[in-house]
């Protein structure tokens, strides 16, 4: 892995929802995340890993992708990234300073030129994580729609320091650590959210976790199957507000020796939609939902004063 990645990992996403209670019920009862903190109009949900939370739900007039949050490797990377974003013409929503959310730390928030709001942070609180079969461990990746995918791909590489690991005809795969991708850019007629993927411990957990979601009345939108780029197994669902969410596992681990492959290398035989050749075609509802969620118009910063919830008092900062 190149030593100069400024970004260490994808930490969390924030989603606006017009029905906070329904969204919270889905992501805790069906999707198997844990409520760890609350504030007026906010709910913070954790997976079983060591991130303080991986999903923030915000009450809003419409469904939208509010913020994608990343943890940087060192304190010195925060001002360096901030200056790079300023020079690239990003809209500054919050300059470097204390994060008053439940995980604390230092952060800044910008909106990149195509409209997605990004947060970069350092020193946020961490939980005592544990692998729990059949339950999400952390976020795996966020897939972002772009009407100008090559421009956005250059931004992620040249400004934010990500590496382009693979490029299919429709998608660019970008990494910031040993995972094959943390961000995927999808060529689309509109900018916005395509889907959010949650990492499970293994293939068996994806299958059993998917069964749990189906048992709770949410049918599979695509899968189970195995992707080409990244080689990860997957099952897609259309969650609340038409947000597409994915269970995934076995993401390919890469280092400097990994050979980039282009669109000519990722071609399936007619009728095939995954590496195995067993996944049925994506449902029409899933396809429509992957284009339905735009970016938030404003960041909607967290309120000060958080209600305790199970687990929040056990968070601590790990070096």
Image (tube, rainbow, N blue to C red):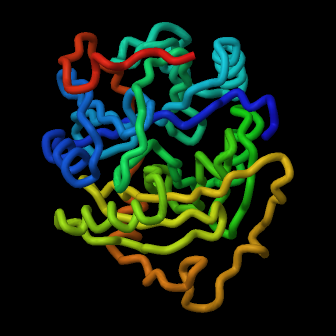
Nearest the camera: 119 or 103? 103
Residue 157 picture location, percent across and down: 74, 40
176 vs 231: above or below: above
Q: Quadrant of the N terminus?
A: top right
User: For the point 49% across and 56% down, which residue is it?
Assistant: 190
274 vs 59: above or below: below
User: For the point 28% across and 57% down, which residue is it?
Assistant: 239
Nearest the camera: 249 or 92? 249
User: For the point 21% across and 24% down, which residue is it?
Assistant: 38
Q: Is residue 279 left or right of residue 112?
A: left
Residue at the far bottom: name it: 270
Q: Is residue 123 left or right of residue 207?
A: right
Residue 11 picture location, percent across and down: 49, 33
Residue 147 picture location, percent across and down: 58, 56
The picture quadrant where one finds residue 252 is bottom right
Nearest the camera: 215 or 151? 215
Q: Quadrant of the C terminus?
A: top right
Number of numbered discs overlaid on the protein picture = 0
139 vs 305: above or below: below
The answer to whether residue 300 is seen in the rendering is yes
Residue at the far top: name it: 97
Residue 75 picture location, percent across and down: 64, 13
Residue at the far left: name it: 21
User: For the point 34% across and 25% down, which residue is it?
Assistant: 300
The answer to whether residue 296 is seen in the rendering is no
């Amino acid at each position: 892995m190149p030593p100069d990645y400024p970004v260490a990992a994808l930490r969390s996403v924030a989603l606006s929802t017009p029905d906070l209670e329904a969204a919270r019920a889905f992501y805790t009862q069906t999707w198997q995340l844990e409520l760890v903190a609350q504030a007026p109009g906010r709910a913070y949900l954790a997976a079983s890993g060591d991130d303080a939370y991986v999903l923030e739900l915000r009450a809003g007039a419409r469904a939208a992708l509010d913020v994608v949050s990343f943890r940087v490797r060192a304190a010195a990377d925060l001002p360096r990234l901030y200056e790079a974003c300023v020079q690239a013409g990003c809209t500054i929503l919050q300059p470097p300073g204390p994060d008053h959310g439940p995980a604390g730390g230092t952060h800044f928030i910008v909106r990149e030129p195509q409209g997605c709001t990004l947060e970069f942070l350092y020193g946020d609180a961490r939980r005592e994580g544990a692998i729990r079969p059949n339950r999400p461990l952390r976020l795996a990746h966020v897939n972002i729609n772009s009407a100008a995918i090559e421009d956005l791909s250059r931004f992620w590489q040249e400004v934010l320091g990500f590496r382009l690991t693979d490029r299919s005809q429709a998608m660019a795969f970008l990494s910031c650590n040993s995972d094959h991708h943390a961000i995927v850019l999808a060529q689309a007629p509109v900018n916005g959210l395509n889907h959010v993927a949650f990492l499970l411990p293994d293939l068996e957990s994806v299958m059993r976790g998917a069964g749990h979601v189906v048992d709770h009345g949410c049918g599979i939108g695509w899968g189970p199957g195995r992707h080409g780029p990244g080689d990860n197994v997957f099952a897609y669902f259309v969650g609340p507000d038409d947000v597409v969410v994915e269970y995934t596992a076995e993401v390919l681990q890469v280092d400097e020796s990994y050979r980039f492959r282009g669109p000519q290398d990722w071609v399936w035989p007619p009728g095939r939609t995954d590496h195995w050749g067993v996944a049925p075609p994506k449902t029409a509802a899933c396809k429509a939902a992957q284009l339905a969620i735009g970016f938030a118009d404003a960041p909607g910063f967290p309120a000060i004063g958080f209600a305790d919830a199970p687990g929040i008092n056990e968070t601590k900062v790990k070096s």
